[in-house]
Every structure is written in structure tokens, then in C-alpha cells.
Image: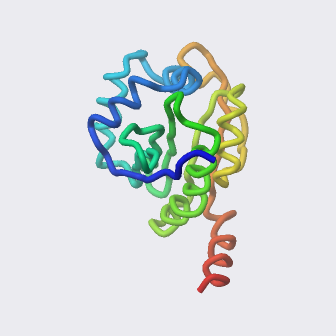
């Protein structure tokens, strides 16, 4: 097992580091939906989203100052948000499990408390690792989103829906309370 993770709020140096050191698969997915492939441009756009982030965390091992991933949920429209996550090559499978469990157990219940009806994430249709990650985090495959990418790449849409999750989280809270 790798080191436990800790979670920090926005830090310019850490976010820029993550943008500049993304895993190739994450970069392919993110840049397929952007007008350029410039890490500083991505950093600048994430900073501009700032006030629209309903949740934003940087994950790093407890014994290190080097971040391994960032997770964000940004408001898209009333009641709807979009989730995003990417990491560096130092992101291990165990780290991914910790992050997915945190999303499922902390982030999504917090989003429901904020009154969101839907949180969605788009992933390249052939990025199987991301699909497994999203499923572990409690998301459900909703369907394909064809030709969403800049060069016509197909994406898969995953969602967390209040109508499907509310009873689950209320049951968990009742059992633990």
C-alpha cells in the first residue's frame, strides 16, 4: 500500500505543477476538449473557474509536498455540475482508490447537500481506467457523447444523479447516526 493521501485547497504552484506534469492519458482526454495543449493555458482556465468550483482539492501523499492529483466539481447551470480529475505519473492505483472513495463518501454527499440534481463527467470512450475510477467513485455510465472532442473524439458520460443517490446516502446516514 502506498502512503495515505492528504487533501489541500487551491495552491498556484501545486495546480501549475499538476497541469505541467499530467499523465499522458489524462492530457489526451483533457486536451481533446480544449482549443490548445498548453499547460499554462489550462492552469489559467482552472484559476478562472475558481469561484464556480463547488469543490476543489489537491491530493498529495502525507509525507510529500508533491501533488499527485486534483479533483474539482464546478457549477455548470442551476442544479448541475461537472466533475474533473487528473493526475501525474506518480498517482498510484492505491491513491486512485483513496480519491475515488473520498469522492463517493465525501464529495458527492456534499454536492447533494448543496442541492445539486446532477454531477457529470466526460471521459474518452476508450479510457477504461477512467471509467473504472468513475464507477468506484459511485458514478453511473449514462451513455456515449459522440464527436465531443476537438478532432471528433467520442466520449462516455458518467453521472451521479440525486434521484438515484439520495436514498442511498440517507440510508447510510440513518445507519451511522
- 98 up-or-down from 87: above or below: below
Residue at (29, 37) in percent of width and height = 47
| Residue occupying image coordinates x 56% and y 50% | 99
Of residues 166 and 132, the one drawn nearer to the viewer in this rendering: 132
Indicate the quadrant where residue 49 lies: top left
Foreground of the two, 117 or 72: 72
Where is residue 61 drawn, in percent x and y? 46, 46
Q: Quadrant of the C terminus?
A: bottom right
Question: Is residue 91 depicted above or below 176 in this figure?
Answer: above
Horizontal side of residue 67 vs 173, given as left or right: left
37 or 112, nearer to the observer: 37
Residue 28, image x, y percentages: 55, 20
Res 166 → quadrant: bottom right
Percent x, y of residue 127: 68, 28
Q: Is residue 177 above or below residue 22?
A: below
Residue 4's place in the image compared with 110, above or below, is above
Residue nearer the viewer, 32 or 175: 175
Amino acid at each position: 500500500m502506498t502512503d495515505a493521501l492528504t487533501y489541500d485547497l487551491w495552491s498556484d504552484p501545486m495546480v501549475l505543477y499538476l497541469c505541467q506534469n499530467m499523465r499522458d492519458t489524462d492530457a489526451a482526454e483533457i486536451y481533446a476538449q480544449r482549443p490548445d495543449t498548453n499547460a499554462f493555458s489550462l492552469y489559467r482556465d482552472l484559476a478562472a473557474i475558481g469561484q464556480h468550483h463547488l469543490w476543489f482539492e489537491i491530493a498529495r501523499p502525507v509525507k510529500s509536498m508533491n501533488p499527485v492529483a486534483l479533483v474539482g466539481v464546478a457549477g455548470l447551470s442551476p442544479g448541475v455540475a461537472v466533475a474533473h480529475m487528473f493526475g501525474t505519473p506518480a498517482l498510484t492505483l492505491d491513491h486512485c482508490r483513496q480519491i475515488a472513495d473520498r469522492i463517493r463518501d465525501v464529495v458527492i454527499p456534499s454536492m447533494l447537500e448543496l442541492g445539486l440534481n446532477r454531477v457529470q463527467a466526460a471521459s474518452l470512450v476508450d479510457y477504461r481506467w477512467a471509467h473504472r475510477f468513475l464507477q468506484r467513485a459511485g458514478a453511473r455510465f449514462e451513455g456515449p457523447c459522440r464527436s465531443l472532442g476537438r478532432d471528433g473524439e467520442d466520449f462516455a458520460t458518467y453521472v451521479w444523479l440525486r434521484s438515484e443517490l439520495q436514498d442511498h446516502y440517507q440510508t447510510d446516514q440513518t445507519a451511522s447516526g
